[in-house]
Amino acid sequence: MANHIMLPPGGANGGNTSVNGRSYSCAAGAALASVPRDDAHALEANGWLNVAIHGTGPTSARPTSFQHGILGNNALYYDTTISAFIAWNGTNWVNAQSGASV
């Protein structure tokens, strides 16, 4: 199951939410990594932002079209092997910041 990186909603609580029996807390502006997919969907329903919609993990676990349906352009994944956000450009995975193929 893919893990996701989440940003909390703004506001006084800074993102204190319980889903599926687990509590998530994160300061506003900080990111919460390694959130299971089902929890990520529940957090989104509570105003959190899913930053890496196709999850996080090593290079070897990058999503492929046959695993997750057709990947749309700019689908984001956080590659823990290279410690960078990468985006699908329709043909290749590229560094989301520089645009260089990775």
Image (cartoon, helix red, strand yellow):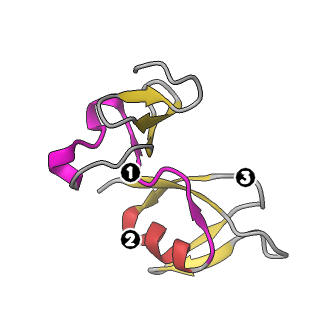
| Disc 3 element | loop
How far apart are the two marked residues, 2 and 3, measured between alpha carbons? 21 Å
Dots 2, 3 in contact, CB < 8 A: no
Look at mark 3 in the image and give the residue it sits on.
30
Q: Amino acid at mark 3?
A: Ala
The front one of 45 and 14 is 45
Mark linked to residue 38: 2
Q: Nearer the viewer, mark 2 or mark 1?
A: 1
Q: Secondary structure at mark 1?
A: loop
Mark 1, residue position:
54
Image quarter where the N terminus lies is bottom left
Q: Where residue 90 is drawn, which disc sits there?
A: none
The magenta stretch is 47-68
Image location of residue 13, percent across then percent down: 79, 75
Estimate how packed mark 1 is, as few (under 14), some (14 to 19) or many (20 or more) residues with alpha carbons within 10 Å.
Answer: many
Question: At label 2, which amino acid type do we have?
Answer: Asp
Distance from disc 2 to disc 1, alpha carbons, whole Å, reads 13 Å
Question: Outermost residue, right direction?
Answer: 12
Instruction: State which mark lies toward you, 1 or 3.
Output: 1
Q: Quadrant of the C terminus?
A: top left
Rendering coords of residue 75 (x, y %): 41, 46
